[in-house]
Amino acid sequence: MHNLAQYNTMEQNVEDRQGGYFKVATGVWGIKDIFVNVYFILNSHDDSWVLLDAGLSTSYNKIKDTAAQLFGANVPPVGIILTHGHFDHVGALTRLAREWDVPVYAHQLEFPYLTGKSDYPPADSSVGGGLMSCLAGLYPNSPIDLSGRVKPLSNGQQVEILTEWQYFHTPGHSPGHISLWRAKDRVLLAGDAFVTTKQESAFAVMVQAKVLSGPPKYFTCDWGLAGKSVQILADLEPDVVATGHGLPLSGEKMRNDLSELARNFQMKAIPSRGRYVPEPAVTNMDGVVSLPKQTSTPFLKIALIGAVSVAAVIGIALLWPGKINKS
């Protein structure tokens, strides 16, 4: 069991939030909206900035307000980078990209889900771990359409609009998932390749429990690739990590726990059951090719989903960008 007191979480920056945002590292800030994080990255050479991910549709005002506080009113980013395109990372994306008139950068294997071509592999409520997993069957997996605005990240690892950063392709949670790395001070923005809370548990999400964990189980569609991705990131030996869910962590204990997660990924991250555990979803540049057979959901889980489904559907309707991006 983790000794949470040993984690260096930059408590002054995280707990004493200024204007609703928290500092991750020099020139990197984040905000949390409900259960997902969004990051703001400064280019130190020219004071331009980049948005990493776009949260939920409810994140729109928070993103605009934070950008104004950090960079000045009416100063748009030079672009938006996506770690991946799951619904909780693109909720405000279409509206922001249109208003700012900026390009959106993503790995080419995410393009089918960002250009209206293919649904994502559906979320899996059978993986266990808590209410967030239990409700996963209700999470949207349909694509958004950014045709004409989305651009591929370079074939190498350089990021065109972030001169000090490089990206690593870290698939498994999604086919084209990427993580950002700044070598000069060993800062890692890992997206959902791994996270720093137990994202399957609504209680852990609510209290922001500090537990370095594998990718959110309910949306991870290739566990073999997910394990290799965590190993790639652990080998970087970061000093600071900030992820799509949970608080930023730093220090020796974080590095040790990340290394332990990579070494024992089967035991620590892969669920004992789940649709994508025996075999992964098969995807390519056109999107989903084939899906493994859906696993059965236990009766008690069905009852629990039924008990909360009305509230959840209402909430998801408010969070999903397809409900607001037609205006």
Image: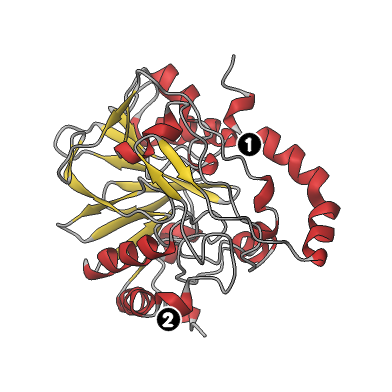
Could you tell whether 305 is left or right of 208 in the image? right
Could you tell whether 312 is left or right of 171 in the image? right
Residue at image x 58%, y 51%? 35
Query: Viewer-proximal residue, 97 or 275?
Result: 275
Q: Which residue is mark 2?
A: 6
* In this rendering, the label closer to the viewer, 1 or 2: 1
CA neighbours of label 2 inside 10 A, class few (<14), some (14 to 19), many (20+): few
Residue at image x 42%, y 23%? 146
What amino acid is found at the position of numbered circle 1 in the picture?
Answer: Leu
| Image quadrant in which you'd find residue 302 | bottom right
Residue at image x 57%, y 47%? 122
Could you say where residue 53 lies in the image, as x and y percent from the top left? 42, 40
| Image quadrant in which you'd find residue 202 | bottom right
Circles 1, 2 touching at the beta carbon (< 8 Å): no
Could you say where residue 50 lies in the image, as x and y percent from the top left? 31, 35
Query: Viewer-proximal residue, 255 or 314?
Result: 314
Could you say where residue 315 lies in the image, as x and y percent from the top left? 72, 40
What amino acid is found at the position of numbered circle 2 in the picture?
Answer: Gln
Q: Which residue is mark 1?
A: 319
